[in-house]
Image (tube, rainbow, N blue to C red):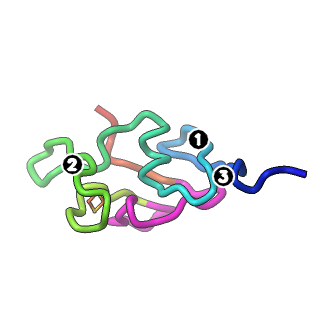
């Protein structure tokens, strides 16, 4: 019998497969996949998560084609396709 606390979810960040524990946020998956930049500013500057609690909107990513989603506020789900700003 497997321990549910050890269960993992598999998803993709910028095409890279990543596995995170159940209950983790997408931001956790983005970080674990090795991406620190989540979006770019209007002037093209790299931006990354700041607050981790939904206020700053610096962690926005595209999820399954839906843009402008705050990755710190959404739980990772199996098979999600997450896209950040182009990696630098
Ligand atoms: S890190 Fe600030 S809204 Fe997600």
Q: Position of residue 21 (x, y in %)?
A: 62, 50
- Residue range in magenta is 63-81
Can you identify the residue that label 3 sits on? 9
User: Which residue is outermost to the right?
Assistant: 1
Task: Give the residue at x 50% y 47%.
Answer: 29
The CA span between labels 1 and 3 is: 8 Å
Give left or right: position of 44 versus 74. left
Mark closest to the chain's N terminus, 2 or 1: 1
In front of the other: 2 or 10: 2
**Mark 3 and mark 1 in contact (Cβ < 8 Å)?**
no
**Mark 3 and mark 2 in contact (Cβ < 8 Å)?**
no
Mark linked to residue 40: 2
The CA span between labels 2 and 1 is: 22 Å
Q: Position of residue 27 (x, y in %)?
A: 42, 52
- Residue 66 lies within the magenta run: yes
In what element is the residue under mark 3?
strand
- Camera-near label (2 vs 1) is 1
Judge the density around disc 1: few (<14), some (14-19), many (≥20) Cα neighbours within 10 Å. Answer: some
Can you identify the residue that label 1 sits on? 18
């Amino acid at each position: 019998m497997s321990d549910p606390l050890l269960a993992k979810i598999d998803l993709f960040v910028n095409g890279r497969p990543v596995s995170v524990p159940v209950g983790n946020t997408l931001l956790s998956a983005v970080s674990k996949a090795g991406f620190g930049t989540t979006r770019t500013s209007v002037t093209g500057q790299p931006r990354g998560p700041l607050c981790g609690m939904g206020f700053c909107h610096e962690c926005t990513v595209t999820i399954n084609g839906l843009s402008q989603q705050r990755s710190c506020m959404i739980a990772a789900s199996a098979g999600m396709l997450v896209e950040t700003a182009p990696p630098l």
